[in-house]
Image: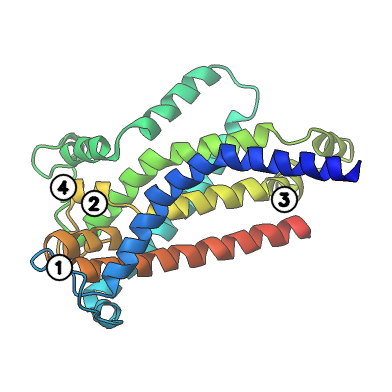
């Protein structure tokens, strides 16, 4: 009997492996092979002018990348950008999700309006806002001038450019936070809220002692996804400012693009990509540990 059971268990495992094998092969081909190739390139002297993997460069590309002041500027701009947009999108998204979780009219209309920016291509969003914020021909400056104020050079000054990029990213991505957090809010159990209402808890006490603790896994997951996306931001920068003026909006993804296609140095760009990957992995590990610690508490 035991022999038959172990035979059946082995057959089930083999059948499962047969089903999952095509997925593993495709994932290996799509994800692991490019990663391995970029890792090998980062330790070579591979360039578009001399595309050969023969010569081993050691960690020279990493040292060269990390000793470049433009890399540290790009990393700092990226960290500021990611922290600012994720913080504001989280606060705005959670506030709006709380409002939409109540019984209000025209919910379907609000959902439709919220979904539109999220499904738009970042390139299309960048082009639209670039026209709207044009210093001379943009509608925004036309309205500002009509109210008697001085027009603003939205994309031509360092401070205006970074704030414009932040505003446009929040405009497009806040919908994601709203929808994810709203899905978490409507799936919360009703019993703790009914008990708090019977005990006479105020709305603020209910929010901080019941809603936010119960929502913490969803909040951490949403933060994690948005942080990863924020570190990968490239399209808006390419379309709206191309990293300028100067290096005011030169996020690290765009800096890697420039090292690849302007500097033609694929080996150093690969080294920079691995540095970026390690930074993002570090953030993911910290947030995962935070989430697991909260679940265990």
What residue is disc 3 on? 213
Q: Residues within 10 Å of mark 1 (few under 14, many from 20)?
A: some
User: Going by the image, does 55 lie left or right of 217?
Assistant: left
Real-space Cα distance between discs 1 and 3?
51 Å
What residue is disc 2 on? 237
**Nearest to viewer (mark 1 / mark 2):** 1
User: Going by the image, does 270 lie left or right of 139?
Assistant: right
Marks 3 and 4 close (CB-CB < 8 Å): no
Q: In the figure, residue 4 lies in which quadrant?
A: top right
Point out the tag, 4 or 1, that comes first from the N-terminus: 1
Q: Residues within 10 Å of mark 4 (few under 14, many from 20)?
A: few
Please state the horizontal and vertical placement of residue 203, each as a whole percent of the image. 73, 41
Q: Residues within 10 Å of mark 3 (few under 14, many from 20)?
A: few
What residue is disc 4 on? 150
**Nearest to viewer (mark 1 / mark 3):** 1
Residue 74 appears in the rendering: no
Real-space Cα distance between discs 4 and 2?
26 Å
Real-space Cα distance between discs 3 and 2?
36 Å
Point out the tag, 1 or 2, that comes first from the N-terminus: 1
Which quadrant does the N terminus fall into? top right
Real-space Cα distance between discs 3 and 4?
46 Å
260 or 280, nearer to the observer: 260
What residue is disc 1 on? 47
User: Going by the image, does 238 lie left or right of 40?
Assistant: left
């Amino acid at each position: 009997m035991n022999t038959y059971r172990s035979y059946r268990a082995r057959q089930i495992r083999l059948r499962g492996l047969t089903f999952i094998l095509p997925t593993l092969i495709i994932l290996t081909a799509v994800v692991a092979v490019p990663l391995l190739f970029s890792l090998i390139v980062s330790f070579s002297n591979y360039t578009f002018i001399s595309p050969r993997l023969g010569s081993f460069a050691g960690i020279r590309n990493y040292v060269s990348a990390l000793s470049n002041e433009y890399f540290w500027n790009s990393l700092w701009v990226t960290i500021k950008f990611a922290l600012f947009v994720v913080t504001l999108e989280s606060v705005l998204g959670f506030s709006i999700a709380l409002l939409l979780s109540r019984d209000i009219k025209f919910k379907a209309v609000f959902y439709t309006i919220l979904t539109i920016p999220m499904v738009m291509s970042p390139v299309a969003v960048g082009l639209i806002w670039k026209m709207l914020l044009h210093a001379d021909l943009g509608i925004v400056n036309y309205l500002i001038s009509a109210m008697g104020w001085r027009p603003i050079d939205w994309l031509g000054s360092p401070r205006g450019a970074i704030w414009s990029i932040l505003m446009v990213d929040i405009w497009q991505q806040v919908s994601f936070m709203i929808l994810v957090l709203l899905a978490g809010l409507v799936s919360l159990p009703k019993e703790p809220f009914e008990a708090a209402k019977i005990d006479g808890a105020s709305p603020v006490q209910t929010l901080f002692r019941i809603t936010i603790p119960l929502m913490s896994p969803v909040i951490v997951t949403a933060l994690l996804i948005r942080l990863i996306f924020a570190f990968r931001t490239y399209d808006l920068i390419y379309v709206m400012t191309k990293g300028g003026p100067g290096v005011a909006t030169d996020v690290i993804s765009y800096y890697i693009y420039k090292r690849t296609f302007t500097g033609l140095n694929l080996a150093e760009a690969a080294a920079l990509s691995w540095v970026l990957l390690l930074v993002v992995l570090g953030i993911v590990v910290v947030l995962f540990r935070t989430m697991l610690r909260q679940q265990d508490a």
